[in-house]
Image (tube, grey):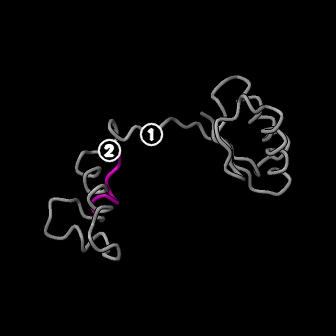
Amino acid sequence: MLLVVTYSRDARTTLRNVCRSHEGTVVRRFGRATLLEETELGAFLALRLRAKHGDDVQIERTRPFNEFETVPEAVRAAATAYEARETPSTPYDKFAAGTDHPDSEAMRDADL
């Protein structure tokens, strides 16, 4: 998919108009950002926005996030356990202390 992010009011207006005119190419809209299908038409629309608005438009190529291929089991288990904790106000580092769950510092520096 192509992620198109706009940084000005004029660029957002043009993006909104493009999305309305080409709904079949739009995967998802987020206000000032949109995901377009990774097709030639999607690329054309994204590049047209950049040609019109210059640096007020950022285009990135994305791919779907598959947590089972990308994220280690320990991190997935920690996220599930943390959301099921008894006291919602417990910060993660306190929750993870003394368990097998990874600490936030280790996760912060580990690339996926």
Residue placed furthest toward the top: 40
Which percent across, then down, holds residue 68?
32, 38
Mark 2 closeness class: few <14, some 14–19, many ≥20 residues within 10 Å:
few
Magenta stretch mostly in which secondary structure? helix
In the picture, measured across the screen, residue 16 lies left or right of residue 39, that is right
- The answer to whether residue 111 is magenta is yes
The foreground one among 23 and 42 is 23
Mark 2 or mark 1, earlier in chain: 1
- State the quadrant of the C terminus: top left
Q: Amino acid at mark 1?
A: Phe
Whether residue 67 is situated above or below residue 43 in the rendered picture: below
Mark 1 — residue?
Answer: 65
Q: Tell me which residue sits at (76%, 50%) in the image.
A: 55
Q: Where does the N terminus fall, quadrant-wise?
A: top right
Q: How far across and how far down the image is residue 97, in percent?
A: 18, 70
- Check disc 1: other Cα within 10 Å, few if <14, some if 14-19, many if 20+: few
Above-or-below relation of 48 to 34: above
The part of the image, by quadrant, that contains residue 24 is top right
Q: Quadrant of residue 18?
A: top right
Q: Left or right: 36 with respect to 71?
A: right
Q: Is residue 80 left or right of residue 57?
A: left
The residue that disc 2 covers is 71
Estimate the spatial distance between the alpha carbons at disc 2 and disc 1, rounded to whole Å. Answer: 9 Å
Residue visible at 68% across and 48% down in the picture: 33
Q: Secondary structure at mark 2?
A: loop
Residue 46 position, x and y percent, is: 74, 36
Q: Position of residue 89 (x, y in %)?
A: 35, 77
Report the magenta residues as a range. 105-112
Which residue occupies the foreground of this view, 16 or 53?
Answer: 16
| Residue ID at (70%, 22%) | 40
